[in-house]
Amino acid sequence: MNALDLPALAPELEWITDSTRVHKFSQDFNWYSPVLKRQLETLSAQVVARPKTQEQIARVVSLCSTHHIPLTLRGTGTGNYGQCVPLKGGVVMDLSAYNQFLGMKDGVASAQCGIRLIDLDKATKPLGFELRWIPSTFRSATLGGLYGGGFGGAGSITYGPIAAPGNVISVKVMSMGEMPQVHTYHGLDALLFHHTYGTNGIVLELEVAMAPSIDWSEFLVVFESFDKALSFANALSVGSGFVKKEVALIASPIVGYFTALQAHLPANHHAVVACVAPQSVVALKELAKQHMGLVTYEKTAQEVLASQRTLIEYTWNHTTLHALKVDKTLTYIQSGYDPQRYLEQVKQLESLLSPEVMVHLEFIRTKEGLVNCSGLQIIRYTSDERLQEIMQIHRDHGVQINNPHVYTVEDGKAGGQLNPEILRSKTQHDPLGLLNPGKLRTWSAPTPMAS
Ligand SMILES: Cc1cc2nc3c(=O)[nH]c(=O)nc-3n(C[C@H](O)[C@H](O)[C@H](O)COP(=O)(O)OP(=O)(O)OC[C@H]3O[C@@H](n4cnc5c(N)ncnc54)[C@H](O)[C@@H]3O)c2cc1C
């Protein structure tokens, strides 16, 4: 039995079998990395299943389990590390049609995994709430995909990453098996399914803590001096009186790649993108003046809505996307600085590696609540060896590399240190190892007991 035989066994489900479309549904944004692109671009599932209900999801799970067919989950495929590229063929299960908003109670929203983040925000805004973090892909990315493969986004400067305790209340998870089981996990147990690339269970529903909804104003503040831009971004980030959703430093020459914003970006200047609450606007302008920054772009929330353009889509990994649209030879790395000395590390590495490495920093709060910055540096790619050297230089300066040029859970953000509980939960929910096989490198199937 192979995956191509499944549609005939379950004709009530929606299946895609056309190989060109199946290949499209088997790929994500791994092409950001020249290394991953080489390894993954030809890989494909055999069929795609598009369930709309929990019963239909269970049917796909049961078929794959019965016939030992690999099953890879997909939201909308905006991941960067080949997370939803099936290494061993089989079925891709597109969960984007399982997308209902389930309600809000006591500041907690619940929704099915396939809901797009923009739709979740739209459903909760009239109730006075918004998501605590949105990736710059919020228009297309799903809640389940963000949980399975993402980190955080705009909002993480206040609420930390998704993994900060208190952000995710619970997850409902389906396990693999001929008779799939559903379990609900809370708090730290729920986090065992975060950033595990859909290898240890199918997250059906999530309950997430929300933030009060705010009409965010958006700003570009530009600086001649890199150091002044850095200290402005830092002062805004640590300043306890500023209500903010986003603070990013995008250094020259990266801002030159923002073609649609050039009227606001003088040559050879560094830019800080900031989203603040209306009551913080006056203080932001004062702070900019103190750091010799010039406000070149200012939009109220109403203007942002009317223009359909948000600066959030110039931050996080959209910054890289804008650069790649202009110059396809570029690539990037992801890094976490040391919260005790990030400013010193940023300056050291900038003077050592610029212009080969171009600075893009996202200011965030860590899981522990400290202000820090996370780097999504853009690199002038020359060779795999040099890329490795650049990452090593960062490590040698005490900066953690969340390597975006590998596709396994262990070797990316986990930095080789996987919580052993994740392996235990893999064995519990997917004993045959059918979920996204090859992505959880250190897991091996339990040996059957001799009878
Ligand atoms: C331009 C660009 C900007 C980005 N900006 C950000 C950002 O600001 N912050 C950030 O964190 N990331 C960012 N990313 C990465 C990516 O957009 C996010 O991780 C996104 O939320 C993924 O959602 P998705 O629906 O596309 O998931 P997919 O890419 O489809 O899936 C991601 C992973 O989750 C797994 N998965 C999907 N659904 C489920 C489920 N129901 N249960 C279990 N596992 C599941 C998949 O198997 C896969 O391994 C960016 C990427 C790009 C290309």
Image (spheres, grey):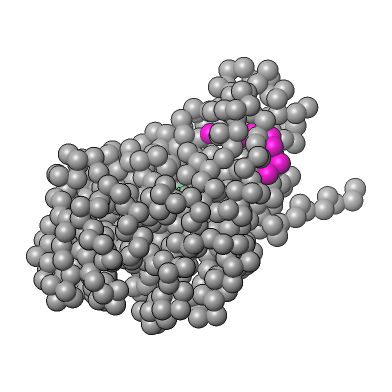
x, y percent for residue 80: 51, 50
Task: Name the residue rendered at 40%, 61% in the picture.
Answer: 161
Is 329 displayed left or right of 375 in the figure? right
Residue 355 sits in quarter:
bottom left
x, y percent for residue 348: 42, 81
Task: Name the residue rendered at 47%, 68% in the picture.
Answer: 356
Residue ranking furthest to the left: 282
x, y percent for residue 408: 63, 56
Of residue 201 and residue 451, the one placed in the foreground of this image is 201
Task: Name the residue rendered at 37%, 72% in the picture.
Answer: 372
Q: Is 130 drawn above or below residue 382 in the view shown?
A: above
Q: Is 277 drawn above or below residue 56 in the view shown?
A: below
**Magenta stretch encompasses residue 88:** yes
Is 173 displayed left or right of 157 in the figure? right
Residue ranking furthest to the front: 267
Of residue 451 and residue 91, the one placed in the foreground of this image is 91
Report the number of numbered marks.
Answer: 0
Q: Is 436 drawn above or below residue 222 in the view shown?
A: above
Of residue 323 and residue 137, the one placed in the foreground of this image is 323
Q: Which residues are magenta?
A: 87-94
Which image quarter is the N terminus in? top right
Is 400 displayed left or right of 302 in the figure? right
x, y percent for residue 320: 42, 54
Q: Let me know if residue 362 appears in the view.
A: no
Task: Name the residue rendered at 45%, 37% in the picture.
Answer: 114
